[in-house]
Image: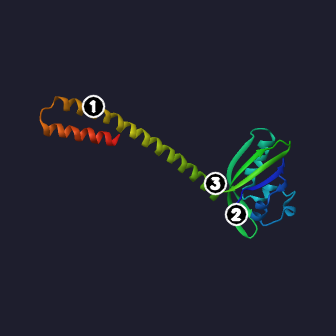
Amino acid sequence: MATLTAVVDARGAILFANSALEDAVGLSRRSIAGVPMTDWFTEPELLQNALAGAGGNEYAVIRYDTRLKRLNHDPLPVHLVLAQTDVPGELVVELLPLEQQARQEREERLIDQAQANKELIRNLAHEIKNPLGGIRGAAQLLQMELDSRELIEYTQVIIHEADRLQ
């Protein structure tokens, strides 16, 4: 589902609504133009308070979760973003259906987790590589001190495996 968007005046009356919002509430733009946007929420006081705060320049953007009323459907859980615009007295209201918001957050978490895993693997490789150099060096020194052909062969195996792992 697309982002539901409306432009409202300082009192919350709808000046413009995109087609996604029309589809969600089940009415045309003409039908909802001029209607207070607070009429479309199960908890209208949240939007009223947000509009009052935006009008008083208490904040530029406010976000909260709420439920959008729809004709002939159950209310739609949405993440509401209310932001001031460049035009005085006009505010933009974006409504992201919560399943979409949850999916975006989940994708962001997966990206963060993949980055953390990559960093962990890089650090682990570094922690393995450094001691291998020491083991290889110790095996070379030991090999120079040994007289037994069998023991020299063991040190060669150690050197070969250390080289292979690096």
Gap in Å between the C-alphas at discs 3 and 1?
55 Å
Position above or below: 11 against 99: above
Could you give the CA–CA distance between mark 1 and mark 2, rounded to whole angstroms?
70 Å
User: Which quarter of the rendered picture does the C terminus lie within?
Assistant: top left
Look at the numbered discs 3 and 1 and tell me whether their residues touch, using CB distance below 8 Å. Answer: no
SS for callout 1: helix
The residue tagged 2 is 75
* Residue 101 circle label: 3
Q: Position of residue 127 (x, y in %)?
A: 37, 37
**Residue 60 appears in which quarter of the rendering?**
top right
Q: What type is the residue that disc 3 sits on?
A: Gln
Relative depth, front residue between 26 and 69:
26
* Mark 2 closeness class: few <14, some 14–19, many ≥20 residues within 10 Å: some
Q: In terms of image quadrants, where is residue 161?
A: top left
Q: Quadrant of residue 165?
A: top left
* Residue 144, horizontal then vertical, whole percent: 19, 29
Using residue 141 as the reference point, say whether residue 89 is left or right of it. right
Question: Mark 1 or mark 3, which is nearer the start of the sequence?
Answer: 3
The residue that mark 1 highlights is 137
**From mark 3 to mark 2, how far is it between C-alphas?**
16 Å
Give how far across and how far down residue 26 sits, in percent: 78, 67
Going from N to C along the chain, the mark reached first, 1 or 2, is 2
Please tell me whether mark 3 or mark 1 is closer to you in this view: 1
Which residue: 71% across, 45% down?
62
Q: Is residue 12 above or below residue 158?
A: below
Query: Which sits earlier in the primary sequence, circle 3 or circle 2?
Result: 2
Extreme residue toward the left, this view: 148
